[in-house]
Amino acid sequence: MENLKEAMNYLVELSKMAETPQVMEICGKTYSNKSLTRYDKKPVASPIKARSLSSMADYIEHCSKEFQGNMIIWIVNETKVLLMSELNGEREREVLFESAAETSEFSFDRWYDQERFMIELQANFEKNEDREILLKMAGNVERKNNVAFSDDGKTQVATMQVGVASKADVIVPNPVRLVPFRTFQEVKQPESEFVFRIGNNDVPEFKLIEAEGGIWKAHAVESIKQYFCEVLTEMPDEISDRIVIIG
């Protein structure tokens, strides 16, 4: 029994040692074997979240009294913008406002059937000449001798109905210049080139493939930066002089 008691006491001591943080120095750096929580850390505000740039602009104009020091508008990418403080005494930044754009849900490099492709084109792209050409093409293409088109790897020829009974072969346009909704609605949507393809299945199907390697993202960020530059010039100097735009 005495040995059992000693063993139990030993286990209790081990558990206490496991609960106690061990602090050590290695190569001049201080480390702990546990994750510690500070209770004297200054609390920070939770960011206001919105879906537009104008909402952030309204906040800056009407709630600047909430700023502590200078502020930064950080354009993270084409769909996300943060309003954050300068570094505080803890070398941290406080995010006061976050805007995340609602963008097109169109999936590039994915096949769509005839009806869905036409719906997606109208719902997720601005109207322009090439979009109207694709709508006309997709709405009228049909199979001919079990083949809807001919394809040499670069140019496709599709059979398109042009009247009640007549049909004609037309060249499928490539590349096409389209304007998807891919950034905030307050700025101009970037136009890009896309490769348009018609599938060789039992029913007509179509897809669009991005052809510019994401160059449009840089244009979108620049447009967002220009938007805030113009907005800030219309605000009092005591507000605009305290804000830096990074993007």
Image: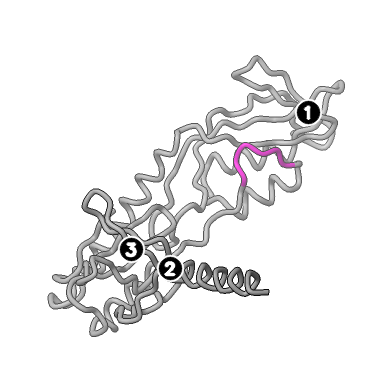
Q: Which residue matches tag 1?
A: 167
Between tags 2 and 1, which lies in front? 2
119 lies left or right of 59 = right
Is residue 140 located in the magenta-colored stretch of the structure?
no
| Whole-percent x, y for residue 237 in the image | 13, 75
Determine which of the numbered discs, if any, sits on residue 52 in the image: 2
Q: Nearer the viewer, residue 87 or 104?
A: 87
Tell me the crowding category of disc 3: few under 14, some 14 to 19, or many 20 or more residues within 10 angstroms, Cα based: few
Q: How is the image coloured?
A: one colour
Q: Which residue matches tag 3?
A: 23
Q: CA distance from mark 3 to mark 1?
A: 82 Å
Q: Which of pointers 2 and 1 lies earlier in the amino acid sequence?
A: 2
* Secondary element at tag 2: loop
Q: Nearer the viewer, residue 159 or 167?
A: 159
Task: Using the rendered view, name the quadrant where residue 245 is placed.
Answer: bottom left
- Magenta segment boundaries in residue numbering: 107-112
